[in-house]
Image (tube, rainbow, N blue to C red):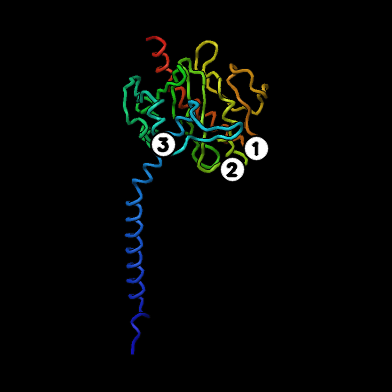
């Protein structure tokens, strides 16, 4: 008697059926988890923004976010305004945190006037902070940061992160010894022109006491990641200079 399961047609039909079943299961799983994933991403952004303006649970050496349970309440407490800057015009937008920097950058195609630039305005201890998200490329994959500035574009705090930098080397951009070096660094030169901050292997200020040299120490063995941080700061934060110029003129 012929064994029908030995036919090629049976194998093909079985493979098609399995693909359809597995695909349906994966689609259902992704759909059911999407709200949870979106919520987790929202909380993580809030934690990043708060960290950059000094609202965190840091100990003497380690970086630590506020808890997921308190992030939303603290975000509402400290972030007083969300703004989107586009082509020189600043508009309040309570959904500014939803902007995907990677997609927005790609859609602009190198035209800065088409970029949607989020600003999160925070108030803490009688001081105003302007927290800005930036996005770039490291050695292996994406790097990004939330940088807190005062009205003179002096860095008040920063949180860096990455997708796939080398552990113990480029991945150290999210360690406090690196992030804290940026606090107090000036983005403008003595003439008020944007210069950024260079992650420099030849920085002559190892204790980072000179905050107007536009340099911080590089991480040993992480040259390309450091160059990515430098480029990210220069390309993205420079776009905000007209916004800060308007702040001082109004």
Q: What is the CA distance from the residue labelled 3 to the residue labelled 2? A: 21 Å
Q: Secondary structure at mark 1?
A: loop
Provide residue 46's location: percent of width, then percent of height.
42, 33
Quadrant hosting residue 202: top right
Residue at image location 32% in from the left, 59% down from the top: 24
Residue 102 - label: 3
- Residue 15 image point, x, y percent: 36, 69
Which residue is label 1 attached to? 221
**Above or below: residue 179 compared with residue 21:** above
In the picture, the disc for residue 166 is: 2
Cα distance between the residues tagged 2 and 1: 10 Å
Residue 94 picture location, percent across and down: 32, 28
The foreground one among 59 and 226 is: 59
Give the answer, above or below, for where 193 lies relative to 202: above
Decide which of 128, 150 is in the foreground and name it: 128
Helix, strand or loop at label 2? It is loop
């Amino acid at each position: 008697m012929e064994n029908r399961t030995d036919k090629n047609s049976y194998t093909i039909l079985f493979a098609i059926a399995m693909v359809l079943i597995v695909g349906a299961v994966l689609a259902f799983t992704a759909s059911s988890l999407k709200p949870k994933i979106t919520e987790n991403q929202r909380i993580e952004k809030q934690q990043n923004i708060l960290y950059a303006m000094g609202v965190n649970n840091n100990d003497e050496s380690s970086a630590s976010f506020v808890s997921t349970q308190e992030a939303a309440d603290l975000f509402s407490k400290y972030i007083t305004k969300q703004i989107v800057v586009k082509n020189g015009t600043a508009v309040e937008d309570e959904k500014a945190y939803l902007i995907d920097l990677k997609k927005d950058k790609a859609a602009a195609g190198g035209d800065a006037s088409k970029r949607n630039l989020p600003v999160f305005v925070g108030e803490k201890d009688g001081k105003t902070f302007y927290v800005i998200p930036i996005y770039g490329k490291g050695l292996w994959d994406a790097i990004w940061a939330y940088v807190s500035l005062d009205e003179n574009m002096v860095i008040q705090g920063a949180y860096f992160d990455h997708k796939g930098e080398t552990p113990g080397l480029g991945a150290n951009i999210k360690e406090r010894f690196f992030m804290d070096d940026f606090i107090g660094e000036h983005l403008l030169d003595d003439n008020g022109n944007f210069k950024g901050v260079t992650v420099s292997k030849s920085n002559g200020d190892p204790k980072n006491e000179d905050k107007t040299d536009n340099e911080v120490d590089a991480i040993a063995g992480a040259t390309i990641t450091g160059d990515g941080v430098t480029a990210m700061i220069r390309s993205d934060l420079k776009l905000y200079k007209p916004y800060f110029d308007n702040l001082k003129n109004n």
